[in-house]
């Protein structure tokens, strides 16, 4: 019998790639939770299947509305759950901390409360973030699961709450919940509020002659470890299908470590315009930054056998091509 899976935040970059992976590699029926105003652009390649309604069913709900979450969970009646929905932009969280806390912490509480009522035996993945570790001393690198939390934004604080709520439900109620702290992951469909996608979009706009040859940046010295979103969703599938351990928590990340500046230089190398100027924009700076993000993913890899397969240059090239294609089609012109 085909399994039923609920993906919260299905219209996001990760949710849409996870949908692709599950449709291509399983026979599961996918219930995707989204807000009524969520743009469907990331699902455009699956619209025929969505309209058919056989294997993809969309459920409208908002993590800030307990009644809508209850109804969505009851309708989905899932065997597996991937809780990806969140207010996911660290910089935005400085301007809207209460909305971030409500969506990410209380929203997780509302979802897990509904699952406890309607699907207590489901295998559940709660997606926290590597941002929970925040400001990490160099002597603690690479970051393992027991590294102390030192969140550096309201978003990161909210993901500490998400992490702890998930583990609490596993321990208090015996639910099969696993929590992940995924380090930087990107690729096609990445929102343009994130550094690498903003850079790729700006360079693509320069390539198309839509803006002057200038790329605006924030902090270029922050160190990141990069993974491809397609490797990330494969990791999430392996998490829930590889002898899941209730209450377990894992760091997951790629293997390519470089600064934001090095990442930008990689993107610039793809452009035919060779005199693009890089300008620091104070408006893109965070008040405090998590500047050393290097993971130890050995616990997860030893449990599941997962290793990243897509190299950094391919990820960046695919992200750049994505924006070239979007602009060619006349979509998503907003400059960031």
Image: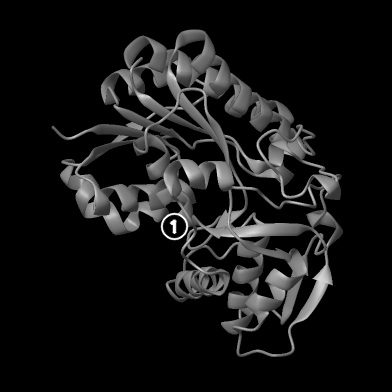
Pointer 1: residues within 10 angstroms few (<14), some, or many (20+)?
A: many
Q: Residue 166 sits in which quadrant?
A: top right
Q: Which of these two is toward me, 287 or 265?
A: 265
Name which residue lies at 71% across and 58% down.
224
Which image quadrant for residue 278?
bottom right
Residue 300, placed above or below residue 307: above
Residue 289 visible, this orientation:
yes
What is the count of numbered marks? 1
Query: Going 80% across and 60% down the picture, which residue do you hit?
Result: 218
Residue 152: name its quadrant: top right
In depth, the one of 226 and 152 nearer the eye is: 226
Q: Position of residue 15 (x, y in %)?
A: 43, 45
Quadrant the C terminus occupies: bottom right
The kind of secondary structure element at disc 1 is: helix
- Would residue 289 appear left or right of 226 to someone viewing this image? right
Say which residue appears at 27% left-offset and 22% top-offset: 75
- Expressed as whole percent of the image width and height from the top left, the position of residue 108 reads 53, 23
Q: Residue furthest front?
A: 302
Residue 271, x across and y down, in percent: 61, 85
Q: In this image, 53 relative to 290: left or right?
A: left
Question: Looking at the picture, does residue 123 appear above or below residue 52?
Answer: above
**Residue at image coords 47%, 49%:** 14
In the rendered image, the vertical position of residue 74 relative to residue 54, given as above or below: above
Indicate the quadrant containing the N terminus: top left, top right, bottom left or bottom right: top left
Tell me if residue 39 can be seen: no
Snapshot colouring: one colour
Asked whether 233 or 14 is in front, the reply is 233
Question: Circle 1 is placed at which residue position?
Answer: 230
Q: Is residue 12 left or right of residue 87?
A: left
Residue 26 versus residue 336 in the image, above or below: above
């Amino acid at each position: 019998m085909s399994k039923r899976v609920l993906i919260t935040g299905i219209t996001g970059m990760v949710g849409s790639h996870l949908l692709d992976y599950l449709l291509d590699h399983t026979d599961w029926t996918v219930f995707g939770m989204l807000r009524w105003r969520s743009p469907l652009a990331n699902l455009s390649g699956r619209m025929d299947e969505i309209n058919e309604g056989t294997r993809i069913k969309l459920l409208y709900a908002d993590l800030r509305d307990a009644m809508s979450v209850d109804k969505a969970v009851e309708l989905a009646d899932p065997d597996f759950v991937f809780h990806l929905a969140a207010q996911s932009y660290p910089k935005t969280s400085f301007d809207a901390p209460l909305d971030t806390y409500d969506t990410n912490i209380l929203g997780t509480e509302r979802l897990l409360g509904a699952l406890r009522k309607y699907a207590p035996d489901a295998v559940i993945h709660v997606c926290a973030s590597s941002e929970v570790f925040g400001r990490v001393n160099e002597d603690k690198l690479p970051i393992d699961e027991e590294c102390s939390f030192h969140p550096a934004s309201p978003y990161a604080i909210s993901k500490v709450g998400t992490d702890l709520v998930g583990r609490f439900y596993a321990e208090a109620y015996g639910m099969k919940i696993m929590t992940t702290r995924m380090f930087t992951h990107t690729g096609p469909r990445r929102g343009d509020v994130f550094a690498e996608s903003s850079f790729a979009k700006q360079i693509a706009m320069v390539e198309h002659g839509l803006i002057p040859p200038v790329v605006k940046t924030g902090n270029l010295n922050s160190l990141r470890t990069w993974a491809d979103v397609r490797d990330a969703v494969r990791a999430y599938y392996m998490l829930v299908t590889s002898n899941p351990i209730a209450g377990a928590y894992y760091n997951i990340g790629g293997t390519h470590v470089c600064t934001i500046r090095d990442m930008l230089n990689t993107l610039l190398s793809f452009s035919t315009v060779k005199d693009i100027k890089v300008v620091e924009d104070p408006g893109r700076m965070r008040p405090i930054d998590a500047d050393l993000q290097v993971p130890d993913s050995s616990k997860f890899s030893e449990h599941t056998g997962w290793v990243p397969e897509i190299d950094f240059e391919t990820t960046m090239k695919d992200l750049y091509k994505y924006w070239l294609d979007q602009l060619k089609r006349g979509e998503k012109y907003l400059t960031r």
